[in-house]
Image (cartoon, rainbow, N blue to C red):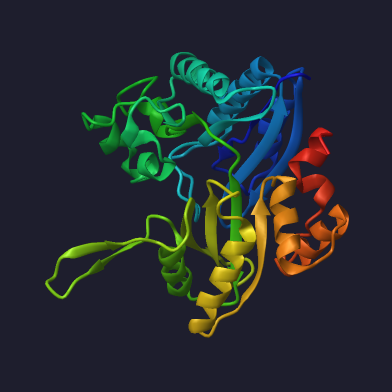
Amino acid sequence: MNKIIECVPNFSEGKDTRKIEKIADAVQRVKGVKLLNIESDVDYNRTVITFAGEPESVKDAAFYAIETAAAVIDMSQQKGEHPRIGATDVCPFVPVAGVAMDECVKLAHLLGKEVGEKLGIPVYLYAEAANIPQRYLLPDIRKGEYEGLSEKMSNPEWPPDYGPSEFNDRVKKTGATVIGAREFLIAYNVNLNTEDISVANNISGMIRSSGTVKITENGEKERVTGMLKFVQAMGVELKEYKITQVSTNILNYKVTPPHVIFEEVKKLANVYGVNASGSEVIGLIPKDALIAAGRFYTTEEKEQNLISVAVEKLGLSQLNKFVPEKKIVEYLLGLN
């Protein structure tokens, strides 16, 4: 493969393995595509599927996955901890090798048009594929979530980029889908050994780029900028493990790598008398992000040792065993 694009769709189902398998099967039936990872979370009720391959094949696989998700997931019945707007909540294209961002943007538009016209699903374009600056950030599009979608679609400022503009019976079941193009994003969550969600929420507000809003002495709202650049964060409960998480999306891991987030959350957690007991990567992670963490914690030089130290110090195996061969994108694609 001379050109490699990665696709990382997120689906609003993390409990029913039969439904998840059907979506994954839809991806695997496309030639020229390699399924890299399937990661589900029961509390989030969400599954992230990662696959890669030649651009046109990846686009086709994404379409079939979205089509299958729309058939097996009923958003009018769906509940979960993670924010979501549709059965296929978000579907980004990521350039990996031999591909410029412009090609990913073009694919996002083509897929959006197909999903809107052939499947009758409202599509919003985001990140580098956004037509409107206000739709660049995923949280802005997802604000109000599925429950607020009917009101959003009726707002003159929020018509979908493709697909139906009314909240009909079809849309009631499927919700909307956000499709875009972006650089590699790391979904990275830090575990806190407390069930008090207010701690995770407070820390999230302090570290995320957008910060938080406080009320001044005059009763006015004032936004306090967050500590870390290119980081989105929110607090999440993991009832299965009786812990909470500072759940983050790292938009530029070269500026703010995972170990910087972990160390900052650890310091802030201590203020609340809580420990950052470990962390996890949802989906895949680039090799150099772990090597950077390894170099922060040790003077070792060998790649394998650096990665082992990073996994240990970040506590990446606390909830589920972190296997580098299954989690590092370069290893899975044979680019190491």
In this view, 101 is above or below 228? above
For residue 107, above or below residue 82: above
Q: Position of residue 280 (x, y in %)?
A: 67, 59
Quadrant (top left/top right/bottom left/bottom right) for the C terminus: top right
Most distant residue in the bottom direction: 273
Q: Nearer the viewer, residue 328 or 159?
A: 328
Q: In screen coordinates, is 96 left or right of 236?
A: right
The quadrant of the rendering that contains the N terminus is top right
Q: Nearer the viewer, residue 219 or 150?
A: 219
Q: Position of residue 270 (x, y in %)?
A: 54, 82
Quick check: 229 left or right of 276? left
How many numbered marks have been drawn onto this rendered protein structure? 0
Answer yes or no: is residue 190 visible. no
The quarter of the picture where residue 34 lies is: top right
Q: Residue at x 42, y 73 (%)?
A: 198
Front residue (pair 244, 209): 209
Residue at 49 percent across and 83 percent down: it is 271
Residue 196 at x, y percent in the picture: 48, 76
Is any atom of residue 185 visible in this view? Answer: yes
- Residue 303 image position (x, y, % from top left): 85, 53
Say which of 229 and 174 sits in front.
Answer: 229
